Image (cartoon, rainbow, N blue to C red):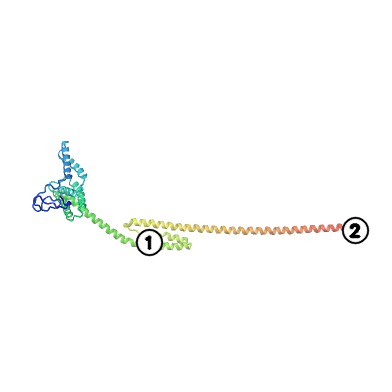
Amino acid sequence: MSEQNGVVPKCPSCGGALKAFAARCELCGHELTGVGANRTVVELVNKFNEIEATLVAAGLQGSKLEKEVSARRARVIRDLPIPNAREDLLSLIHFILPKLQGVGKRDPNEEDWRVKFTEVMNLARNAYRGDVKTREELEALERSANLGFTEAVKERTRRNPMLFLLVGGVAVLAVVGLISTQWQGWQEARCTAAYTPAAQAETARLESIVAIFDGKLQQKDYAAAQAELAQLRWQYQEACKAEAVAQETAAWETRRQALAARIEAAQAAEREQAAAEIAREKAAQQAELDQEKAREAEQQRAVAAQAEARRIARAEAELAQRARRGAETRQARD
């Protein structure tokens, strides 16, 4: 029975307690040859053997055979399903680990195994999340795999000086890049520290110009308002803040144009008001002229009526006089 069922595995030779995924008894040194021989591992080994046999039968030899075998094994490793059972996970870890420790000849699929090893380790940590002792052993195995990777790099560097130079060059570039990044960060912080108060002072200067402009505009002193607008431009420049400077310049130019539009609107309103006043004055003058003409016409009509009345009175007087004379003449005849 397994640890999962509550029974601690024991060495078949001495009966001593065994650690999880141990390959040798720590008490008596007995080799545990059955470790890792689960179905997933057996199927994987069979697939590898089948790949090589197929390629050999196809006539591949030498470096071509090794290259093709490595490529096909990489696909199998990448697509290898990871078991869920805890014992299977431990067996798979034990199977992959030697391929990462650089023991003997380097495995051509070491990088593929390392990726799969990481996946299996992550699942194993989750499976044993409540088992502190096993998780510690898993961490020890992971350190062993990483140490094997480091030792393999050292060995390859010893055998290939050019690799040493390449690794050293990469390290130097990394250090230079880090220093450059830190220097740029320091320069940026220094620039920001200088830019912020200067930008605030420039903003205050421009706001004071706007205040003066408002006063001149209320007084309808348009020439003075235009003169203030001529000064309403962002002048502070900072090379390290080119984008911020461009934004401020554009923003204040937009505001300056809006204020200039206010001047034009005020002048247009004033022109309209003056035109309306002139129109009102002309209308008043025309009305007064029309009234004067009406009065003159009325006077003329009154004079004409008086003249007509006098004419009629004279005519009536003449008629009356003639009638008296006729009457007197008739009386004299009689």
Quarter assignment of residue 232: bottom left
Figure quadrant of residue 317: bottom right
The location of residue 275, given as percent across then percent down, is 54, 57
Circle nearer the N terminus (2, 1): 1
On the image, the x and y values in percent for residue 73 come to 18, 43
Secondary structure state at the residue bearing disc 1? helix
**Pointer 1: residues within 10 angstroms few (<14), some, or many (20+)?**
some
- Along the line of sight, which residue is nearer the eye, 5 or 252? 5
As helix, strand or loop, the secondary structure at mark 2 comes to: helix
Q: In x, y percent, where is residue 112?
A: 19, 46
Q: In the image shown, does 60 or 251 lie closer to the viewer?
A: 60
- Give the residue type that dot 1 points to: Thr
* Relative to 266, 182 lies left or right: left
The residue pinned by badge 2 equals 332
Q: In the rendered image of this protein, does residue 157 appear above or below residue 294?
A: above
Residue contact between numbered discs 2 and 1, judged by CB atoms under 8 Å:
no
Relative to 278, 187 lies left or right: left
Q: CA distance from mark 2 to mark 1?
A: 124 Å
* Residue 203 marker: 1
Q: Image quadrant for the C terminus? A: bottom right
Residue visible at 63% across and 57% down in the picture? 290
| Mark sitting on residue 127 | none
Number of marks in the rendered image: 2
Q: Which residue lies most toward the top here? A: 58
